[in-house]
Each structure stands twice: as C-alpha cells, then as structure tokens.
Amino acid sequence: MGIFSKLFGQNENSKFKPKQPLLDLIFYEALVDRIAVSDNLKRELKDELKKAFEKPKSFYDDNNEYILTDRGLRYSKGVSETAKFVLIDTLIDNGQMAEVDWKEEENEIRVFLNEIRIAKNYDLTIDDEDLHEGYNTGEILKLIDEKELKAQGYSLVILDINSDSYVFTIVSFNQKHEIEEMFVAMR
C-alpha cells in the first residue's frame, strides 16, 4: 500500500475512501513533502499552511482581499481556498511551481520550466528553442512532458485551479500519478 493509501485509508481492493477530510493540514503537509525539495521551504510552507487553517484571515487585508497575489479571492468567499493558494503562491515565489496563461508563448513556458528545474536542482535538460509551433498552451505542456521530461525520468503535473491558466510543477516520473491524485483532490 502506498503512502497516499496509508494516509487516507484506501485499501487495494476498494475505491478511494478517505478516513478524514482530504483538504486538511495533514493532506497539505503530505503534498509539501512530495513536491517541495528544500527542507527550509518545506518548513516555511508547513508553517504558512498551518496558519492558513488556523488563522485564514491573516492572509487577507483590511478590505478582505487576499494579499499574496492578485487572485480576486475575498475572505468571505475564498477562505476555503486559502490553503491551496498559499501553497501555490509560496511555491511560485520560490520557483518550484509556475502559472502560465492559457495563451502563453512556448518560449515563456520553457523559461518557467527551466526556473523550476533550477529551483529544484533537477538534473535534466529542457530545450530553450520552440519545438511545438502551432500548438496551444495545454498541448505544448503535454508535448514537453511526453517528449522531453518523461525520457529523463521526470514529469509535469498540472493543478487545475478553475481558471484560464495552467499551474504546474515538475516531479520525478515515479511520483506523477500520486501527485496527480492529490491535485485532483484539491479541485
């Protein structure tokens, strides 16, 4: 049984049935342990996530607007999303995750992927040249994942945040499915 199964009570013969609410601090801490590579960042993120669950108002200004990035979150409506966006925005600020627009140019996507590679100190190569002209952003991300990252033992995982942008990080290929499951649980 994998760590995700142990953590949430899935046995090998049953469909996913969590023992506890998925979107709690334990869930986020487990995710941090899997996608962040720096011990200092892991500690910082876990502290910020604990604060997001215990004092979500601390991430909103006097006008009840989310303060980490311009996401349009308001305290009254966005509090259930606070931990997710604290995780995303902190990882983005530390170069270990990226967010691109739905119509992003391939060269910009590659810049972000290289920033993640460098921040995570991954021994892999991401081409600097545009190799997939005529494709949209989602297709470009998929092609880079399949044609460049997979061959090197890595994979791109995308977190759907119900917007017109793509939020993603790079993980080792053997972590891909577990991280994808966790990202799906965060929708």
Image: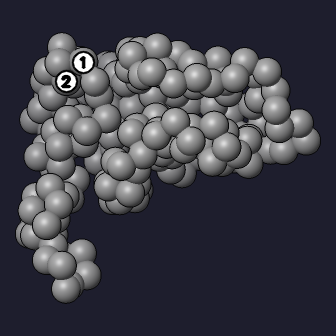
What amino acid type should be assigned to the residue bearing mark 2? Lys
Q: In what element is the residue under mark 1?
A: loop
Res. 130 in view: yes
Q: Of the numbered discs in the image, which one, if any, rests on residue 86?
A: none
Identify the residue at horizontal 14%, vertical 55% (top origin): 3
Quadrant for the C terminus in the image: bottom left
Residue farthest to the right, as pictured: 134
- Image-quadrant location for residue 67: top left
Res. 77 in view: no
Read off the residue under disc 1.
38
Residue 76: give x, y in percent of width and height: 32, 42
Q: In what element is the residue under mark 2?
A: helix
Residue 9 is left or right of residue 117, and the answer is left
Relative vertical location of residue 60 with respect to residue 82 in this rendering, above or below: above
Q: Are marks 1 and 2 in contact (CB under 8 Å)?
A: yes
Relative vertical location of residue 52 with respect to residue 81 in this rendering, above or below: above
Quadrant for the N terminus in the image: bottom left
Read off the residue under disc 2.
42
- Density class for disc 1 (Cα within 10 Å; few <14, some 14-19, many ≥20) is some
Q: Nearer the viewer, residue 1 or 134?
A: 1
Instruction: Tell me which colouring the rendered structure shows.
Output: one colour
Q: Which one is in front in this view, the residue at disc 1 or the one at disc 2?
A: 1
Relative vertical location of residue 40 with respect to residue 177 in this rendering, above or below: above
Relative vertical location of residue 68 with respect to residue 184 in this rendering, above or below: above
Give me the C-alpha separation between circle 1 and circle 2: 6 Å
